[in-house]
Image (spheres, rainbow, N blue to C red):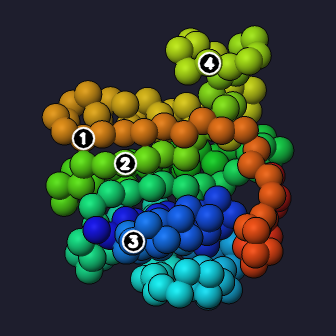
């Protein structure tokens, strides 16, 4: 079973890929390396002793995403790619809205076209807005305090609507706070090329 991991060379993505490979899934990584490094791919291979398919593409590019789906037998998508710096999102809102929401639409459309029914989306706790903590999943989502958070909320709505309209299409939304730490080996961890979170 091949799982497409977008942003698989990034901090969270690398850890996800390691766990997938350790559990005998085949992994296809799509990453444009705007905030990561291709060196991470070698580290994933080193940690697992297994190979991955790596495609250096931007997942807002419909034709590039289509080429991935045509060249592999994708059974599910874990969408971790996205711009992630809150402060930068305030300075460059259009860049964030375009990258984070268009990538979600392109990937969802590819899934529908190719019959892929499982989609995991890397959202954020920022979608809860100024709710009282601790946050619980049943809370009403309030407006996010920044464009980054809004891109996550919009992408969640897109995927939820697609799931409602498409029998059998399953979406999981991961709403976490800032993850910290590195792999126990020390080989992979937060090492951004661009703006850190």
Q: Secondary structure at mark 1?
A: loop
Q: Secondary structure at mark 4?
A: loop
Of the residues under marks 4 and 1, which one precedes in the sequence?
4
Mark 3 or 4, closer to the camera: 3
Q: CA distance from mark 4 to mark 1?
A: 24 Å
Q: CA distance from mark 2 to mark 3?
A: 19 Å
- Evaluate if marks 1 and 2 touch, with contact meaning CB atoms under 8 Å apart: yes
Of the residues under marks 3 and 1, which one precedes in the sequence?
3
Q: CA distance from mark 1 to mark 2?
A: 8 Å
Instruction: Tell me which corner region of the image, top left, top right, bottom left or bottom right, holds residue 189.
Output: bottom right
Residue at 64 percent of width and 59 percent of height: 12
Q: Viewer-proximal residue, 157 or 184?
A: 184
Tell whether 96 sits left or right of 154. right
Task: Report the disc number at residue 119.
Answer: 2
- Disc 2 residue crowd, few under 14, some 14–19, many 20+, Cα 10 Å: many
Q: Which residue is mark 3?
A: 24
Mark 2 or 4, closer to the camera: 4
Across and down, in percent, residue 102 comes to: 46, 50
Of the residues under marks 1 and 2, which one precedes in the sequence?
2
Q: Which residue is mark 4?
A: 136
Q: Which residue is mark 1?
A: 169
């Amino acid at each position: 079973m091949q799982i497409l991991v977008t942003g698989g060379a990034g901090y969270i993505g690398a850890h996800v890929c390691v766990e997938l490979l350790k559990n005998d899934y085949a992994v296809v990584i799509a990453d444009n390396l705007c905030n990561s490094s291709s060196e991470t791919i070698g580290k994933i291979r080193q940690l697992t002793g297994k190979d991955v398919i790596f495609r250096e593409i931007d997942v807002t590019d419909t034709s590039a995403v289509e080429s991935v789906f045509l060249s592999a037998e994708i059974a599910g998508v874990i969408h971790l790619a996205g711009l992630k710096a809150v402060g930068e999102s305030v300075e460059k809102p259009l860049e964030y809205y375009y990258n984070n929401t268009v990538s979600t639409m392109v990937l969802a459309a590819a899934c529908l076209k190719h019959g892929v029914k499982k989609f995991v989306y890397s959202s954020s706790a920022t979608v809860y807005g100024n709710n009282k903590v601790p946050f619980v999943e049943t809370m009403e989502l309030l407006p996010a305090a920044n464009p980054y958070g809004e891109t996550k909320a919009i992408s969640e709505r897109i995927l939820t609507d697609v799931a409602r309209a498409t029998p059998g299409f399953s979406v999981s939304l991961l709403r976490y706070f800032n993850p910290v730490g590195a792999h126990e080996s020390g080989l992979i961890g937060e090492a951004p090329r661009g703006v850190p979170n």
